Image (tube, grey):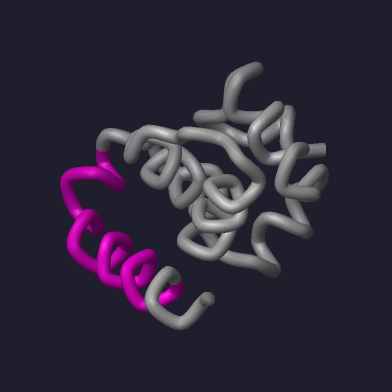
Amino acid sequence: MVDKLRNLGKVSIEMLKAAGIETGDQLRARGSAAAFVAVKHAGCKPSMNLLWALEGAISDRDWKEVAKNDRLSLLTQVEVLEESQP
């Protein structure tokens, strides 16, 4: 269950469920950027903090560390995914 992963609270978990992501394995298989895009396409309005939290949940790091160190890479991944979808 995603509720056992670091950085994810009640609202984040509900957004992931709306996107059909209910387990840690599903989140890891999608990756943080694709999961973030899926949440947006599910009609949710996530902040960028969700992207950092998702990557932190996958890599077992604090979301603030992710935001500081991986921001550009994650934003680029999200942009590429959004451009490739109709």
Residue 82 is covered by the magenta coloring: no
* Residue appearing at x 81%, y 43% in the figure: 22
Residue 86 vertical placement versus 26 (above, below): below
* Residue appearing at x 69%, y 68% in the figure: 29
**Outermost top residue:** 10
Count of numbered marks: 0
Please name whichever residue, 86 or 13, is drawn nearer the observer in this view of the structure: 86
Residue 30: percent from left, percent from top: 64, 66
Left or right: residue 41 versus residue 13 is: left
Residue 9 vertical placement versus 79 (above, below): above
Left or right: residue 26 versus residue 35 is: right
Residue 34 vertical placement versus 86 (above, below): above
- The quarter of the displayed image where residue 46 is located: top left
Please name whichever residue, 46 or 86, is drawn nearer the observer in this view of the structure: 86
Residue 51 vertical placement versus 64 (above, below): below
Residue 27: percent from left, percent from top: 68, 55
Q: Quadrant of the N terminus?
A: top right
* Residue appearing at x 76%, y 58% in the figure: 26
Left or right: residue 52 versus residue 12 is: left
**Outermost front residue:** 86
Residue 39: percent from left, percent from top: 59, 46
Please name whichever residue, 31 or 76, is drawn nearer the observer in this view of the structure: 76
* Residue appearing at x 60%, y 20% in the figure: 11
Task: Please name the predominant secondary structure of the magenta segment in the image.
Answer: helix
Left or right: residue 31 versus residue 73 is: right
Residue 77 is covered by the magenta coloring: yes
Please name whichever residue, 30 or 7, is drawn nearer the observer in this view of the structure: 30
**Outermost bottom residue:** 84
Residue 15: percent from left, percent from top: 64, 33
Q: Range of the magenta residues?
A: 65-81
